[in-house]
Amino acid sequence: MKQYLLLAGTVFLGGLLAIAAMSIPSFKTVTAQDKPLTPRNQPGTDTTIYSPKLHGLYDGKFRLSCGRTYVVGSLSDKEGWEHIDNAGQNSHLVNGTVEIDVDEIKNTGKFVAKLQLPEGLFELTLDKFHEGVPCQDGGVASMIFEHGDSGCGNTIWPKTLLYIAGWGTGSATLDGKPLYTDYQAHFMVTQGIRDRKTLKVNYPVVARKDIDGKPTMAGQVNPAAMQCDFWIRSPKGNNKNNPPREDFMHFYSTEVTWK
């Protein structure tokens, strides 16, 4: 009887070991080709996001409309003007449309703003995209950080996530007549840089520090809001103006519609 019990116990134990062995995953050397897709980590931020190019369904096509658009200053401002307006005191609401239709993968498409300014119908077209620095990713880029201490762009504005942006050469007309030809132009759809009510850019917050206790220009935007900024500027400079350009027309929209 004891022999039968011993034999039965041995068979039962052997069965358990076989089942356990089946559940143990096999291990192999992981090569670069086998590595899984991982989130992008950009220097200067602890936020990790998946690059659009890591998404299998990503088609690179962005179609948006921007509304409630403001012009900073005017076309008729005399030398010495300030056309950044982080204080939100020199922005004027204008009528018109802003349309974005670009392919981020191919760096093609078009940005068109048609705005009724006091001086006449202003139309800005940006359809020749090219990068000035590597972070601009060929001229049209999506889901990158710019400004502040991101290491991409200037520090006029705080670090913000750019949902879609374009850089390149644009032209503008006024009442159908050429105004600016082959000027530098840029648009960007970002997190909320300006206060919803005052339009002020609350930046920089000098006392703000990162998780390591170091001063930082990050985190000074409102992720619950979205806006579209765009400008066109002359290659020629003028240090009497802000920004220091002979011509610089700056606009921003506080409403964004995705299509």
Image (spheres, helix red, strand yellow):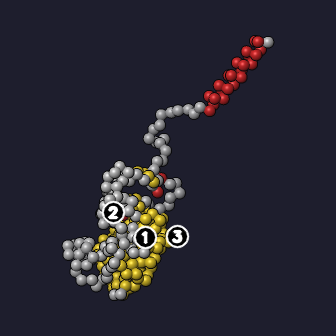
Image side of residue 124 versus residue 18, left or right: left
Q: Residue 84: which quarter of the image?
A: bottom left
Which residue position holds label 2? Answer: 205
Query: Looking at the image, is mark 1 or mark 3 earlier in the sequence?
Result: 1
Circle 2 — which element? loop
In the rendered image, residue 200, in percent from the top left (x then y), is placed at 36, 72
Q: Is residue 61 visible?
A: yes
Query: Looking at the image, is mark 2 or mark 3 earlier in the sequence?
Result: 2
Q: Residue furthest front?
A: 207
Which residue position holds label 1? Answer: 227
- Please say if the residues under marks 1 and 2 sit with CB atoms less than 8 Å apart: no
Q: Can residue 153 be seen in this view?
A: no
The residue at 73%/15% (across/down) is 6
* Residue 259 circle label: 3
Q: In this picture, is 79 found above or below 139?
A: below
What's the residue type where badge 2 is placed? Val
Circle 1 — which element? strand
- Please say if the residues under marks 2 and 3 sit with CB atoms less than 8 Å apart: no
- Of the two numbered discs 2 and 3 in the rendering, the one whose residue sits closer to the viewer: 2
Q: How far apart are marks 1 and 2 (CA)?
A: 20 Å
Q: How far apart are marks 1 and 3 (CA)?
A: 15 Å
Query: Looking at the image, is mark 1 or mark 2 earlier in the sequence?
Result: 2
Label 1 CA crowd tier, 10 Å (few <14, some 14–19, many 20+): many
The front one of 38 and 150 is 150
